[in-house]
Image (cartoon, rainbow, N blue to C red):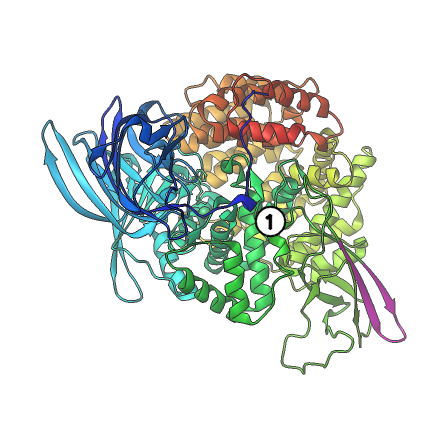
Amino acid sequence: MRDAQPKTIFLSEYRAPDYGISHTELHFELFDAHSLVHARLHFRRSDTASDDATLVLNGQELELQALALDGEALDAQDYELSDDVLRINGLPASGVLETTARIYPQSNTSLEGLYRSRGLFCTQCEAEGFRKITWFPDRPDVMSTYRVTIDADARHCPELLSNGNLMETVELPNARHRAVWDDPFPKPSYLFALMAGNLSRVEDSFTTMSGRKVRLIILVEEIDLDKCDHAMDSLKRSMRWDEERFGREYDLDVFHIVAVDDFNMGAMENKSLNIFNTSCVLAAPDTTTDAGYQRIESIVAHEYFHNWSGNRVTCRDWFQLSLKEGFTVFRDAEFSADMGSRSLKRVEDAMVMRTQQFAEDAGPMSHPVRPASFIEISNFYTLTVYEKGAEVVRMLQTLLGENDFRRGSDLYFDRHDGQAVTCDDFVAAMEEASGRDLTDFKRWYSQAGTPELTIRDSWDAEQGVYRLSVSQQTPPTPGQPEKEPLVVPLAMGLLGEAGNLRVSLEGEMPDGETADNTHRILMVDQPHQEFRFTGLPERPTPSLLRGFSAPVRVDYPYTAEQLLALVSRDDDEFVRWDAMQQLMVSALQTLQAEPRRSSLDPLLEEAVNAICSQTLDPAVQADMLRLPSETYLAGLASHHGKADVHGIFRAREALRAALAHAFRQRWEQLFDAHRVTGFYAARGDQIGARALANVALDYLASGNEEGVSRAAQYYYAADNLTNRLAALRTVLREGDAAVGDALLDDFYARFKHEALAMNHWLSVQAENTSGDAIARVRALMEHPAYDSRNPNKIRALIGAFANANAVNFHKEDGAGYRLLGEVVEVLNEQNPQIASRLLTPLTRWNNYAQGSELMRAELQRLSELPSLSPDVYEVLSKSLA
Ligand code: TRP
Ligand code: ZN
């Protein structure tokens, strides 16, 4: 490992800054070969700091051109300048510090700070990118108002944008021009943004609940002007929803969304100047899937919601990241649930949690929702901080009830408006609004790992008493060998022969006939607990963790008969879906143990029949009929032992073939019954119908030549990307190579000028499980459709290969690991954030029955590289520990 090891930062060492910056003036002079950043920081020493306190300014990759205090140049003995900090000693209690930095946006490949994307100047400052623009106390507890002047070439950069309100525009000599922006809301530096370039605008407006008219502007390349309607509609719906559900109104007269091609993540909530990855803005039926439309809606909402949960009330330090991210994901999930189907959204979020977040909890980078330490904060923009953090907020709402939760959120926003606060402050507001003591609940913020509930039951027929014994246990995670019990809201019901039974707990007063007495939330907060249900006419089947009421695993020894009962008759769609998953998982386990077995369990057959013959939401039906993913299965297997990815793959293919064969009639019927006629719309009814028809088509084509040619025709006839891609994937898996290649060529010819559609073209090939996948991926890395510096392309090709092509990534000779390692090696220099994210599948080396030695060896090889970024260093050192 490199000699100067990056430093670990601890939450316990947090100290408030000695100096604040009340106002910041920035003047950018943008040129092609370099840019100049002139800063005037109005500093003020805090009341608690001593007279000899130092002003600490972060700064990286900056060339110092000028430095002055209150108009006078500073002498060399007044400051210390290193690679990443500028310290100024002996300052008065307040004054103005002026700096000029020279920077090189055109050669910034990290996509942090000020960089260029297809010629456009843009910024990404979260978490610590502002220090690559100018010297500043680059920490979220320093909140300042900003006035920003931008000078640039008028022809290449007709648009000049920053946060807040436009104050003036000025023509300058030499075909240059200037814009001046003023943001009256104090904000941390990570919310600063600037954009300068040649983009076209789509404009609309929104009138807020108090009657203020807000201009809504989306900026994209001219050829994409026709792809903005969906994002604009999503924005307007989000603004209305946040007023209605959370009482939150927008606070400026203008709101911008700028779409850029080269972006490390999905989007960024900079005050009034959101910057988005093009993939999260642009939508058209030919180039965007149904899932893509839904993703755009939720990300537009997410960034908009940050205006309150993140911007008006921000984080004190980066350990509190989930304060804004967990809460905002919860808010966007509720929004999506209200815009579409609540139970479908729950099933899909549960799938992400169980497949990906549980794996993170079980891996070497495992951390709590509020981490206690980190080396590089960029590595902690994780499923744990975002999705598990949102589940923690959801559990709070479940415990408090919607009314008290809303009062808590009002109190939180009102009390902390304009402040940088902590997760404790959030919970304190919830405690005050509800009168509840949430001390024990708060362990969810500090304890890592996925709790497992082990549930057993017994039945006393004479007394009509049913007992559930519940134990909880959380496996150890790095740095946390001992775990304490958590407060787990366990939503449940009891299913009888004829439907849901009344749930009454022993010792409880019957609560009359008014309330819903078939549904209940058990508070599990001890290592072992017993719940006794009385007055039951028959032995029930427990319906557990309804609505995925907590981010936990449940171990209850269901019989296949019980699972069939839940699939067919339970009240809760999450439980029905989960029961079907469990039936499929056990069928897959049987197939893995006895590969020659060809008959299906009759109970699984009955379950499929039950799903097909009921009036369920087609989208949920589709999720129920789809095979559990290889990733989910590998995660389950490694929870109990080691995963055999090749065995999982073969078992899954065998189950697919068996289901395809056993239900040919059904697939025909479903496919015909759910074909969408009429114009494409990304509406719930159509999306659900397409999902179900495409699942049916996939089974129809499985091991069936006639079905494959149907799929090929369906590909050519498609009027939208969802159907076209579904058919393409099916043909690539089931058809002759020549047929698949013909479709790929056709796809390329149609969409070669559509960057976002080409990402899918790269992914379907990267995910192709045929034997030559590695050679194909290597060839595609040289293809004009690929760009080794564009994160979307890297994710589409390399990310898809490593995460969604297990049999090839885990090739016995280690060629898949080497391919990933080589890409990471290059990205370590170019774009460390993307490099360390890409490493994730290799870090799971300990999960596998074969290959773990080779995976470790590749990690070891990388760890010996001469210069590792802190991002990659942290992931490697924790994975090899
Ligand atoms: N705050 C952004 C969001 O959740 C996340 C983000 C965007 C980000 N770009 C980033 C985080 C770059 C780290 C680095 O919406
Ligand atoms: Zn966010």
- For the residue pair 234 and 314, the one nearer the viewer reads as 314
Q: Position of residue 242 (x, y in %)?
A: 40, 61
The answer to whether one can see residue 632 in this image is: yes
Q: In screen coordinates, is 816 left or right of 851?
A: left
Magenta part of the protein: which range?
Answer: 456-472
Determine the main secondary structure of the stretch shown in magenta.
strand
- For the residue pair 30 and 594, the one nearer the viewer reads as 30
Q: Position of residue 379 (x, y in %)?
A: 53, 36
The answer to whether one can see residue 656 in this image is: no
Disc 1: which residue: 622
Q: Is residue 464 magenta?
A: yes
Q: Is residue 695 magenta?
A: no
Quadrant (top left/top right/bottom left/bottom right) for the C terminus? top right
Q: Is residue 405 above or below residue 586?
A: below
Label 1 sits on what residue type? Answer: Ala
Label count reads: 1
- For the residue pair 363 and 705, the one nearer the viewer reads as 363
Q: Position of residue 50 (x, y in %)?
A: 40, 47
Residue at the outermost front position: 51
Which residue occupies 17% across, 30% down?
155
Which residue occupies 56% across, 20% down?
2
| Element marked by disc 1 | helix
Which residue occupies 29% across, 38% down?
194
Q: Position of residue 237 (x, y in %)?
A: 37, 57
Residue at the outermost bottom position: 512
- For the residue pair 150 and 712, the one nearer the viewer reads as 150
